[in-house]
Image (spheres, grey):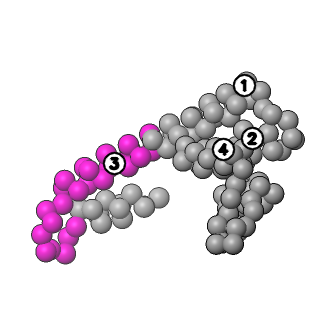
């Protein structure tokens, strides 16, 4: 079972009731918790971080300081990924601009990829 489905299922099992039509009905508190999990995933938090943000590891609600620490760690990771993506974008744009797109065997894009793979 994928981690998100597992976490959602873990916290929703006790909250849901099956209706004759096959729908699940959640309490307002559980619906709020499910929205929290989904929104945290949209923001890129790992399942471990979400558990920590919800206080699921030790059963205690996290302090604002703990939440801030997790958030700042995550923000640093996001910024590093953005920097990597910007570098990749620059390399791809430069390489693509060197390509004529003609039906010829020589391709600057493939040359750049091949040459960057050399040790």
Label 1 near label 2: C-beta < 8 Å? Answer: no
In the picture of the structure, the residue carrying the numbered disc 3 is 89
**Magenta range:** 83-107
The residue singled out by tag 4 in the image is 32
Q: Earlier in the sequence, mark 4 or mark 3?
A: 4
The answer to which of marks 3 and 2 sits earlier in the sequence is: 2
User: What residue did someone put label 2 on?
Assistant: 54
What is the CA distance from the residue labelled 3 to the residue labelled 2? 36 Å
- Which of the 4 quarters of the picture holds residue 50? top right
Q: Decide if residue 46 is in sight here.
A: no
> Does the magenta portion include 89?
yes
Tell me, yes or no, if residue 63 can be seen here: yes
Classify mark 2: helix, strand or loop.
loop
Q: Earlier in the sequence, mark 1 or mark 3?
A: 1
Question: Which label sits on residue 64?
Answer: 1
Q: Name the image quarter holding the N terminus.
A: bottom right
- For marks 1 and 4, the one nearer the N-term is 4
Rendering coords of residue 107 (x, y %): 22, 67
- The x and y percentages for residue 94 are 25, 49
């Amino acid at each position: 079972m994928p981690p998100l489905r597992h976490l959602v299922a873990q916290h929703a099992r006790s909250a849901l009731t099956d209706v004759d039509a096959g729908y699940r009905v959640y309490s307002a508190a559980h619906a709020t918790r499910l929205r929290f999990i989904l929104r945290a995933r949209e923001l890129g938090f790992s399942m471990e971080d979400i558990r920590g943000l919800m206080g699921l590891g030790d059963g205690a609600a996290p302090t604002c300081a703990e939440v801030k620490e997790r958030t700042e760690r995550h923000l640093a990771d996001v910024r590093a990924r953005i920097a990597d993506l910007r570098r990749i974008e620059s390399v791809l744009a430069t390489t693509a601009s060197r390509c004529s797109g003609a039906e010829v065997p020589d391709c600057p894009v493939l040359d750049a990829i091949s040459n960057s793979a050399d040790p």
